[in-house]
Image (cartoon, rainbow, N blue to C red):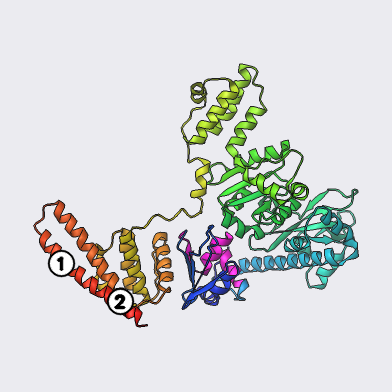
């Protein structure tokens, strides 16, 4: 993975237009000054709690707590890592990236890979044009139409057609300046060992581009149109940029919807994925009929914390689901199974029964562990003790990984009923120490934001004070110098005040590495500071509120301990209360005079 120069990263950050970037995903409305608001793309809501500060180039949701800069927005919404987000933004805003301290051989390899990416992109564009413009592709267009797939979505997925001639793409690629070695390295050609002739790998086939999360084409899957063509499905050969076992078809298109929904739908075929998107399920991806690999599970965990397995109900599909469970074991990924009708795939259901039918199926998904238990019971011979013992043996690892929960008790009761045994006996036979949290807990621990905790009135005052210090830096510096750690009710807010005393002009900078709580709070306060019309009178009110709350706590503590200072502290509190009342009147008068 390349390491880019700091100057390049700074240029990317400077080039980001937050209203343009966020506005491409969220309908924003100006809410005053440089602030914009809209519905949060990270959680469902009816009234806007999502705010963008165009000047500070920050966003924050006051509902779910997510926030950060433009890089973090792309990471959170599209499921990209830091480098992937930087590269995506650099592409969007046409910023050249310079690699820092790169070994010459590494630079050469990177440039060669960039050439392959360019060649594959050209091939994808050519195939798309062939599908929609060539007479030869009429059969391919008819097939796709018969599957009920809309042209708009097919174009979005960049579905194409490889012509039947032996060397159409080969000749075009040579003409564009690519050598035979590069064309072969990209998996677009192959060589006859006997004759030595080089020819196009894909011919007379519907072509589906396989891209990474950023949308870079890495290879292709191709479906034969003629009954005489074998194999029916042909993929790009393994090479430097393409590894079939790592691919998820449609991940570049589904990533934003998966991140927002918190779940990804997994099906088998290319047309299944496109049909689900057509039905409104924009978080669907495909594993292309293969047994799920560790690399695919890793890719899925980067999209969303929950996976709905909408695989065929035949034995192969069920085995694929069980393999998915084995591969995902130990990961914080919740797997659920969609009850697909036997003999039907998602594309057929959408075409035959409509979008509502397939959406309803997704809503009836069950935890994978329940599917495992039911399948073990359904496929076993339960007529004798030996068969029952075999089921217990098969289910022991399943229950070993299942922590104590209502779900576990329900499954124990299900096994006991099917085996015609007492619940206690089944529990004893299956009992084993739990190794980790129940799968249902994974959604809250795999990158999805936990609901923000309730904030007390006192803490709201403290946050408002700090936000006003940011909004009014001249008066804010003076106010921060007057308050102490005793004025804040939590350790986080005390750290925030200390941080702002040094970084008031740029609150989100200088946060200690790894202090995610402080980073989130600084983003929230910086966004909050850009809202409304702050005045020095408002800051004075909040500062006096902090002092009044501090004295309240001091009086309570002194009263409990029999401290003789109670009367003195109470007198100080009364004096502060009088000043606070006067400050509130002054703030109201100042606001009414605007």
Nearer the observer: mark 1 or 2; the answer is 2
Q: Position of residue 135 (x, y in %)?
A: 90, 64
> From what the image shows, is residue 478 above or below residue 39?
below
Magenta region: which residues?
64-90
Badge 2 crowding class, 10 Å Cα cut-off, few under 14, some 14 to 19, many 20 or more, is some
The answer to which of 536 and 20 lies nearer the viewer is 536
Residue 76 highlighted magenta (yes or no): yes
How many discs appear?
Answer: 2
The answer to which of 527 and 280 lies nearer the viewer is 280
Q: Position of residue 316 (x, y in %)?
A: 72, 38
Q: Which mark is residue 587?
A: 2
**Kind of element beneath mark 1:** helix
In the rendered image, which quarter is residue 487 located in? bottom left
**Kind of element beneath mark 2:** helix
Residue 505 highlighted magenta (yes or no): no
**To which residue does mark 1 refer?**
572
Q: Position of residue 44 (x, y in %)?
A: 54, 57
Give the left or right position of residue 51, taking residue 290 as reference. Answer: left
């Amino acid at each position: 993975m390349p390491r880019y120069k700091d100057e390049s990263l700074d240029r990317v950050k400077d080039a980001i237009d937050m209203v343009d970037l966020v506005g491409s995903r969220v309908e924003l409305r100006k809410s005053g000054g440089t602030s914009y608001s809209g519905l949060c793309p990270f959680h469902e809501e009816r009234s806007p709690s999502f705010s963008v500060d165009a000047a500070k180039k920050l966003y924050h949701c006051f509902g779910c707590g997510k926030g950060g800069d433009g890089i973090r927005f792309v990471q959170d919404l599209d499921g990209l890592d830091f480098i992937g987000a930087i590269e995506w933004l650099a592409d969007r805003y046409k910023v050249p990236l310079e690699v820092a301290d790169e070994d010459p051989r590494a630079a050469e390899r990177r440039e060669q890979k960039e050439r392959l990416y360019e060649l594959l992109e050209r091939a994808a564009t050519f195939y798309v044009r062939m599908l929609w413009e060539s007479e030869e592709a009429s059969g391919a267009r008819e097939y796709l139409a018969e599957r009920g797939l809309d042209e708009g979505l097919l174009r979005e997925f960049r579905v194409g057609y490889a012509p039947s001639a032996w060397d159409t793409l080969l000749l075009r690629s040579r003409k564009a300046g690519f050598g035979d070695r590069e064309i072969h390295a990209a998996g677009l050609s192959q060589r006859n060992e006997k004759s030595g002739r080089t020819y196009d790998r894909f011919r007379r086939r519907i072509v589906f581009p396989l891209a990474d999360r950023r949308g870079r084409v890495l290879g292709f899957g191709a479906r034969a149109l003629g009954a005489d063509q074998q194999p029916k499905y042909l993929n790009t050969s393994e090479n430097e940029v393409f590894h079939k076992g790592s691919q998820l078809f449609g991940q570049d298109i589904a990533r934003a919807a998966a991140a927002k929904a918190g779940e990804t739908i997994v099906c088998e075929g290319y047309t299944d994925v496109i049909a689900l998107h057509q039905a409104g399920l924009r978080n669907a991806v495909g594993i292309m009929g293969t047994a799920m690999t560790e690399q695919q599970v890793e890719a899925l965990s980067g999209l969303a914390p929950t996976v709905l397995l909408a695989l065929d109900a035949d034995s192969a599909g069920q085995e694929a689901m069980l393999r998915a469970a084995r591969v995902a074991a130990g990961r914080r990924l919740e797997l659920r199974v969609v009850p697909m009708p036997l003999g039907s795939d998602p594309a057929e259901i959408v075409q035959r029964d409509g979008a509502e039918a397939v959406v309803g199926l997704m809503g009836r998904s069950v935890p994978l562990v329940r599917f495992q238990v039911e399948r073990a019971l359904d496929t076993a011979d339960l007529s004798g003790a030996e068969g029952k013992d075999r089921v217990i043996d098969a289910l022991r690892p399943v229950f070993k990984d299942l922590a104590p929960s209502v779900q576990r008790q329900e499954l124990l009761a299900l096994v006991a009923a099917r085996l015609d045994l007492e619940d206690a006996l089944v529990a004893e036979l299956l009992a084993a120490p739990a190794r980790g949290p129940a799968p249902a807990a994974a959604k809250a621990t795999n990158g999805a934001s936990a609901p923000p905790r309730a904030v007390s009135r006192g803490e709201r005052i403290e946050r408002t004070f700090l936000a006003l210090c940011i909004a009014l830096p001249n008066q804010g510096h003076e106010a921060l110098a007057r308050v102490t750690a005793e004025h804040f009710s939590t350790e986080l807010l005390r750290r925030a005040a200390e941080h702002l005393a040094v970084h008031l002009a740029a609150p989100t900078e200088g946060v200690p590495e790894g202090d995610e709580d402080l980073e989130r709070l600084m983003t929230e306060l910086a966004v909050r500071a850009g809202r409304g019309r702050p005045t020095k009178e408002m800051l004075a009110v909040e500062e006096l509120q902090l002092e009044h709350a501090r004295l309240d706590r001091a009086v309570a503590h002194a009263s409990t301990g029999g401290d003789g200072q109670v009367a003195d502290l109470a007198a100080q509190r009364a004096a502060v209360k009088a000043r606070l009342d006067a400050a509130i009147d002054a703030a109201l008068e100042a606001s009414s005079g605007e």
